[in-house]
């Protein structure tokens, strides 16, 4: 489990980008739920924590793809592949994330860059 | 309605097909595409794909499990429309009859009046264009970009990163003055020089010179720019010649109401070829943006299926983005209406800021440079205010 941030530092309706490879987006919904998904849109390089949170759905700030925070499923194109959803535990006011063991669906340009950094 | 034909197999056409199925249309669906390719994403053609960082397979717009139940006719060019029975005539002599027609034939790159036929001279619109340009950029040397628009800026950025010597020639005093307006375009014009790209503004191009292959670009002010490769990025014209004489009203594209309906019942139009009436500005506007092709398709399909009876949902203000020199530009709204520009966050010199164009006390456009989060908030604000204004008429 990775400690990400304190719940008190993440107001409802806000998102937090946790630097990781790849980065993780943690959302605190208006209903009070906390969810974590991969931060990078699967379509092109954009940060979902910069997107628009509505209910249990986030809209990508670049091309308006929508993802379900609970499952990572694509709710609206142009994205074709889901983001990974990560397990969240809140304990003693701290948000912890258990990273999914699945391979992330990164957009081609980001995957290319990470591959280049890995080789360097 | 038993058969709907969509003419055009790019983003607008595909989005219309998806909208037809999601809005419950279960009849026959025919999709005609002039290009031989299934729908693909064009924005990466000037960026990741051109740079060789993205494989062709990643450009596909359809998902693997897409169930549109459509009959695809690719490599089929429409040459005419008979309004009486909504029959689409094809260049190979064939005909497709339909009860409803979605016109989504897009736009084609404009070219220079002179200098056609020289090797090494490119436009960039299609996948085939991008393949050819990529081959020429791999030769290295000197690239001259004619045109100060987004395509030109993105190609310049990509070519510079590939190691070419690059010059951008813009007829306007600052590049991007058309889409961003003069106030905002000045804020981003320094990006070229920051990255070692030469920018020549306020001069037109007289012609191109060379033997079989281009050797130089000749400017109206008398200068001669040596060039191994030339990219002409001087805008696009709507592909609507095939509708001339059909009765579908044309005026800088297909003239549409606020829901995509044309002057002919049973025919709607969407995407780069369509000039929709925009209540926010009280005029017809042809919007050549990716998001317009995506978002307006659903509205056009609603119009088609309801026979024009349903009131169209207000569409969001034009939005586009551009990635160049490692910087992300996002723009929404109507810069032509503005009388002043303010910087709301950051500083232009830092290449990270958010600027707002105003008309009196009303925001009419927003430009974000590496400011995705506040940009999103401002874009929503523009949309909300537009809806309120539309409701007050």
Image (cartoon, coloured by chain):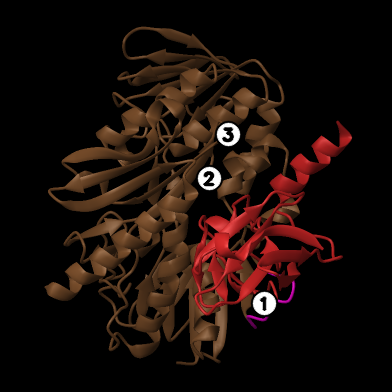
Identify the chain drawn in red.
A
Give the residues drawn in magenta, as a range: B63-69
What residue is shown with label 1?
A: A70
Vertical relation: B114 (above or below) A35:
above
Give the overall secondary structure of the magenta segment. Answer: loop
Q: Is residue B338 magenta?
A: no
Which-is-in-front pick, marks 3 and 2?
Answer: 3
**Chain label for disc 3:** B
Q: Are marks 3 and 1 in contact (CB under 8 Å)?
A: no
Q: Quadrant of the C terminus of chain B?
A: bottom left
Q: Secondary structure at mark 3?
A: loop
Give the distance between the C-alpha atoms of the residues marked 3 and 1, in whole angstroms.
32 Å
Residue B103 visible? The answer is no
Q: Position of residue B12 (x, y in %)?
A: 48, 65
Tell me: A118 left or right of B159.
right
Q: Colour of chain B?
A: brown
> Do discs 3 and 2 belong to a common subunit?
yes
Q: Pinpoint residue A84: horizontal percent, then vertical percent.
A: 74, 66
CB atoms of marks 3 and 2 within 8 Å: no
Residue found 48% across the figure and 38% down from its top: B151
Chain to which the residue tagged by mark 2 belongs: B
The answer as to whether the residues below labels 2 and 1 share one chain is no
Disc 3 marks which residue?
Answer: B326
Q: Nearer the viewer, residue A86 or B198?
A: A86
Left or right: residue B66 compared with residue B354: right
A85 w.r.t. A16: above or below: below
Q: CA distance from mark 3 to mark 2?
A: 22 Å
**Residue in view at x 81 percent, y 36 percent:** A117
Labels 3 and 1 positioned on one and the same chain: no
Q: Tell me the quadrant of the picture where the N terminus of chain B can be found.
A: bottom left
Q: Which residue is mark 2?
A: B125
């Amino acid at each position: 489990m990775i400690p990400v941030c304190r719940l008190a530092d993440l107001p409802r309706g806000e998102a937090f980008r946790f630097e990781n490879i790849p980065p993780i987006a943690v959302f605190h919904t208006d209903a009070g739920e906390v969810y974590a998904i991969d931060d990078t849109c699967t379509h092109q390089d954009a940060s979902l924590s910069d997107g628009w949170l509505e209910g249990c759905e986030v809209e990508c700030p670049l091309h308006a793809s929508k993802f379900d925070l609970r499952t990572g499923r694509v709710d609206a194109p142009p994205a074709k592949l889901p983001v990974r959803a990560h397990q969240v535990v809140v304990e003693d006011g701290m948000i912890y994330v258990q990273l999914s063991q699945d391979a992330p669906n990164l957009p081609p340009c980001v995957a290319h860059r990470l591959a280049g950094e890995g080789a360097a | 309605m038993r058969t709907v034909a969509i003419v055009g197999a790019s983003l607008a056409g595909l989005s219309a097909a998806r909208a037809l199925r999601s809005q419950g249309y279960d009849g026959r669906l025919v999709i005609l595409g002039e290009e031989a390719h299934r729908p693909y994403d064009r924005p990466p053609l000037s960026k990741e794909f051109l740079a060789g960082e993205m494989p062709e397979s990643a450009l596909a717009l359809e998902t693997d499990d897409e169930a549109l139940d459509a009959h695809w006719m690719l490599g089929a060019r429409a040459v005419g429309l008979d309004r009486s029975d909504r029959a689409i005539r094809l260049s190979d002599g064939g005909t497709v009859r339909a009860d409803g027609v979605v016109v989504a034939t897009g736009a084609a790159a404009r070219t220079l009046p002179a200098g056609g036929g020289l090797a090494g001279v490119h436009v960039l619109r299609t996948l085939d264009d991008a393949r050819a340009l990529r081959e020429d950029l791999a030769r290295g040397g000197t690239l001259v970009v004619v045109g100060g628009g987004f395509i030109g800026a993105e190609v310049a950025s990509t070519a510079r990163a590939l190691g070419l010597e690059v010059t951008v020639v813009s007829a306007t005093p600052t590049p991007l003055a058309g889409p961003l307006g003069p106030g905002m375009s000045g804020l981003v014009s320094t990006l070229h020089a920051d990255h070692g790209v030469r920018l020549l503004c306020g001069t037109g191009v007289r012609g191109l010179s060379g033997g079989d292959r281009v050797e130089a670009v000749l400017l109206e002010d008398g200068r001669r720019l040596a060039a191994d490769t030339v990219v002409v990025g001087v805008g696009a014209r709507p592909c609507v010649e095939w509708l001339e004489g059909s009765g579908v009203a044309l005026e800088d594209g297909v003239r549409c109401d606020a829901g995509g309906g044309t002057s002919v019942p049973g025919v709607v139009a969407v995407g780069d070829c369509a000039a929709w009436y925009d209540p926010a500005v009280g005029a017809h506007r042809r919007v050549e943006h990716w998001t317009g092709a995506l978002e307006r398709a659903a509205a056009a399909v609603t119009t088609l299926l309801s026979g024009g009876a349903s009131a169209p949902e207000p569409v969001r203000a034009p939005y586009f983005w551009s990635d160049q020199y490692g910087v992300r530009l996002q723009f929404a709204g109507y810069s032509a209406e503005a009388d002043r520009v303010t910087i709301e966050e950051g500083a232009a010199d830092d290449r990270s800021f958010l600027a707002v164009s105003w008309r009196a006390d009303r925001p009419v456009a927003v430009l974000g440079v590496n400011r995705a989060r506040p940009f999103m908030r401002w874009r929503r604000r523009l949309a909300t205010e537009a809806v309120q204004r539309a409701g007050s008429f």
